Amino acid sequence: MEYSFLDFLGLIGAVGLFLYGMKVMSEGLQKAAGDRLRNILSAMTRNRFTGMLTGCAITALIQSSSASTVMVVSFVNAGLMTLAQSMAVIMGANVGTTFTAWIIALFGFKVNISMFVLPLIGLAAILLFSNKSKTKSIGEFLIGFSFLFMGLDMISQYVPDLQNNPEMFAYLRQYASLGIGSILIFTLVGLVLTMIIQSSAATFAITLIMCSKGWITFDLACALVLGSNIGTTITPIIASLSGNVAAKRTAMGHLLFNLLGTLWCLCVFVPFADLNAWLTEAIGQGDPNALYAFVNHLEQTSPEIYNHLFDNSLPAGHEAVAKVAMMQMSVSFGLSIFHTTFNLVNLSVMIWLTNIYVKIVMFLVPGKKGDDEEFTLKFISRGLLNASELGIAQAEKEMWVYAERVGRMIDMAQTLIHTKEKSDDFNKLFSRLEKYEDISDRMELEIAHYLNRCAEGRLSNESKLRIAAMLNIISEIESIADSCMGIGKILNRKIEAGAEFNNEIYSNIDTMYEYVRSAMQMMVEQLRDVENVNQKSLIASYNREREINNYRNALRGANVSNINEHHYEYQAGIYYMDIVGDLEKTGDYIINVIDTLRDSFRKNKE
């Protein structure tokens, strides 16, 4: 087999064209769909059955279960899809990938992708000159789609020609008569081969070649296809390495689904392979076992015809050519039926165990202990920023987590006020408050950095405005954290001054805290689903802000009288008002977030 360095560079270029096409297609789709993509995904994965159908349809459309599962990993990492939803989509993707096997079985390798790719590029070029942003985005999507399939076509041209590599096949042939051992060996070969070339469809094609040359029987071909089901999980596993825990769990779920399916099939492999051979005959496609016997008989009795058969030097009307072509079709159908039957049986059983899968995967890939006490971003991952519009969705989820975490600081600060001064508990709680404030600063920087990276991508005008609003929100949330830390510093100054609070002060501060905590909870709840901020929740937040301001004014007005009437010392009153003023500022920061949600998010829904 001659394979030059120039061929290798051609392969690298083809892969580059494929990846670039995927990037342009993804960006075009994100720009055209925008925020509607989240609603579309939610509708498509409403329950396990719609999720399964979604995975099946997408994989059949793009003819790659690896590509579809990598997309699912990205969606889970972005918080657009739950782990349970992703399991159903992945199960469907395994059935969808059989569509490619049927294309090979029905049409062979004669589909000329360039026949429709070039006209599609011509159409896309016209759309790119449109004045409408959405139309341009559709043009970009079509250009990317065309480049992606053009890259796939070129990859098949520059990949080493395995058909003309008899040394490799001869090496495998000596392991074809070991009974159960051969089945296990060829399952492993299918696994490793698919991991290397990252395409179960390519493994299927290679398997068909090996059968055609009479090197392996039909049941060993089935073993190769079975192993490819596990090998195809390597792509999403690689994609999840730089993702969050949810992304890793999704990839693990894909591996677990295919692994358990392969194990049960190996337990009943011989009768299951015979069943599929019988089904092939039953639909009138002949016995898939006949090809192996015919080709080996031909090799022994007419070696010259055998050799000419596979170098395409026999005339088209030759009897051997016609017989082999017919038997190849039979094997191709048999493997397609095996692949489809296996995945359908697997799906019909596993779809009911989705929740159990989720629990097993969460056990196998546990979250980090003490997650809330460490600096971790749950949804944002540097490694999976592949579409700016989806990046915004990741940041929205992270913004909610950020607000929820800062909200805990309000409870810490209130507890600190009631903790015995200069005690170990006071020092520990103050240190914890400091740690949270430090985490808050770093989270603000990371989310802002991520949003800036998203802004560098190809975004719609609506999304650019949304990023600006989100930057404003995270700044206000960080100010809330600063206010909570500010109360801890006020308490330290109070301790140094030797001032004492009485029960009246503590009671008033606790009431003020109840108002602020309630306002914070309302804000966090609205950040949980920024797409559906409603008028009722906005009105409740504004009413709570007025209550905070009115109560602050009442406490400030009563403070002078309380000092004059000797309810507490003047110095205690100073620190008391400092805390009340700090809490009122917290309320201001909260209402600033509410204003931004009202102006920059809610109006887009009307």
Image: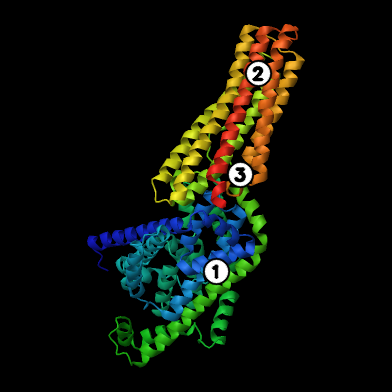
For the residues labelled 1 and 2, the Cα–Cα distance comes to: 59 Å
Say which label, 3 or 1, has the lower sequence index: 1
Name the residue at 37% across, 90% down: 320
Q: Mark 3 points at which residue?
A: 528
Above or below residue 107? Residue 541 is: above
Q: What element carries label 3?
A: helix
Q: Residue 50 is drawn in which quadrant?
A: bottom right
Above or below residue 352? Residue 237 is: above
For the residues labelled 3 and 1, the Cα–Cα distance comes to: 34 Å
Q: Is mark 2 on a helix, strand or loop?
A: helix
Q: What element carries label 1?
A: helix
Say which label, 2 or 3, has the lower sequence index: 2
**Of residues 530 and 398, which is closer to you in this image?**
530
Which of label 2 and label 3 is nearer to you? 3
Q: Mark 1 points at which residue?
A: 95
Is residue 605 something that shows in the picture? yes
Q: Mark 2 points at which residue?
A: 426
